[in-house]
Amino acid sequence: QSQELSQVQIDYHAALQALVEDGTRMVCTGRMHTDRICRFESLCYSTEAEEFVFFHSNASVMLPNLGSRRFQPALLDLSSVEDHNTQYFNFVELPAAALKFMPKPVFVPDVALIANRFNPDNLMHVFHDDLLPIFYTMQQFPDLDLESRLFFMEGWSEGLHFDLYKLLSNKQPLLREQLKTLGRLLCFTKSYVGLSKITTWYQYGFVQPQGPKANILVSGNEIRQFTKFMMEKLNVSLEESASEEYIVVFSRTINRLILNEAELILALAQEFQIKTITVSIEDHSFSHIVRLISNASMLVSMHGAQLVMSLFLPRGATVVELFPYAINPEHYTPYKTLATLPGMDLQYIAWQNADKENTVTYPDRPWDQGGIAHLDKAEQERIIKSKEVPRHLCCRNPEWLFRVYQDTKVDIPSLIQVIRQTVKSKPGPKKQKWTSGLYPGKVRDAKCQASVQGTSEAKLSVSWQIPWNLKYLKVREVKYEVWIQEQGENTYMPYILSHQNHTFSENIKPFTIYLVWIRCIFNRNLLGPFADVLLCST
Ligand code: UDP
């Protein structure tokens, strides 16, 4: 035992010596605070000051070295939500010599991923802002493996869904509060700070009204790789066998209720001749819900965070999102955007309550549950009369909260009608091959030959070879797009062609230089890259 202790002592002294001599070393990726992730050796954290500490020595490295731009506004975003001013990361700097006067550092041996969760009590936020970004940040850096440890610095307690975070690594994630119990000065041997935003698809409306992100970079494939991982960790196996089909109604039991849920379930079961079941976060375990959803043909639910569970639906299934009165479905599309990501292969249907008679409002509840009693009378009147919530910013718009926390009696015939417009026979999982959509490469060996007839007519014969990858693919339809541009002009003549050569004679002038651009198109919408431009003189 004493040997073990001395072993630790030796390691400790070695680690301390390394810290004092080498200081902190940081190298980051990303050009701006919004896309930066940093790798550190010997990053420290003072649990008393609640600040990260960068120790300078002869061997310390700080890349990027931003000077005071490090505070404009921060080194990086600690959460996956872009440029949110409560989620910034920075450190204070000290000379390594100051360690002599500081509490003895406690070393964290595990490779650490240090980040903020954005809203751990809301299931949409849990998946979209935390779990997916953590999963893919870990994929980006090989030493963030299952033996690494997550550190959540946002300051929340575990929250309602902590079990989900625990699935991402074999070590128990640690919260900011818990760091105090470990020591006054913690030093992370090796750590990564920040989260990848590459998988997020929605912006919540902090600077402009909420909506899909401008540049979505994730497809259903990556989402499904993540859900596969989660299901394995949850011990939920995918039932490939054609077991009985069913519809899941995901109900809310506290607010934003479906008032005629029993009637709705009967109607769905009757209309589609399929078993229909309900689940809720309050009444079912998470793995039970995942098990059910991952084999469902259709998921029906009120707008709300529980709909993020459509992540787990099988390909071909249908998502039906119900919106309360005066909430325009087009303005709130986190779940529509998810369902319609390329390769998610889900059908999405929105239904809105258009009948004021069928809504139940709660003007006297607290403001955060949609109450409006605190507003002046004229404003209350206006809200109650309004037929649609105007576009607004997050997160405290009283008219939005008032409307989104209404209960709804669903008009069954109108709901069945909108579902029927999309789902013709029985709903979901179609035993269809899902074509993945691969893009053509460049066309090859493009050549042109000109011929001049007299002083006013000319012809241009252009030929090329198929893209290299085509011979390995089964493609339904292969076309070529050719642009012919007179040198020095801004406009061009576009052509769509089926063959690998063509003679152009319309609008071709003699003694002129043309630029010819050629690309291949698979199945009408998979546009390949243009080959190097071809210069042709008539
Ligand atoms: N929630 C729930 N049942 C309810 C009300 C809320 O399961 O009756 C869950 C909801 O899915 C989310 C969290 O509680 O994970 C917070 O709900 P809130 O209404 O604040 O957010 P929203 O669903 O509108 O995103």
Image (cartoon, rainbow, N blue to C red):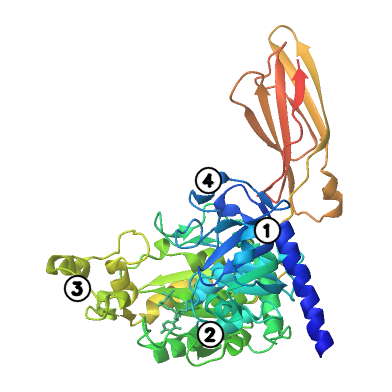
Name the one closer to the observer, 389 or 74: 74
Which mark's residue is nearer the viewer, 3 or 1? 1
Which mark's residue is nearer the viewer, 2 or 3? 3
Kindly state the secondary structure of the residue where label 4 is placed: helix
Residue that sits furthest to the top in the current view: 455
- Residue 193's quadrant in the figure? bottom right
Q: Are there few (<14), some (14-19), or many (20+) residues within 10 Å of tag 3?
A: some
The amino acid at mark 1 is Thr
Which residue does the numbered mark 2 point to in the structure image? 248
Kindly state the secondary structure of the residue where label 1 is placed: loop
Going 64% across and 89% down the picture, which residue do you hit? 244
Q: Is residue 7 above or below residue 507?
A: below
Q: Which mark is residue 304?
A: none
Which residue does the numbered mark 1 point to in the structure image? 24
Which residue does the numbered mark 3 point to in the structure image? 374
Q: Are there few (<14), some (14-19), or many (20+) residues within 10 Å of tag 2?
A: many
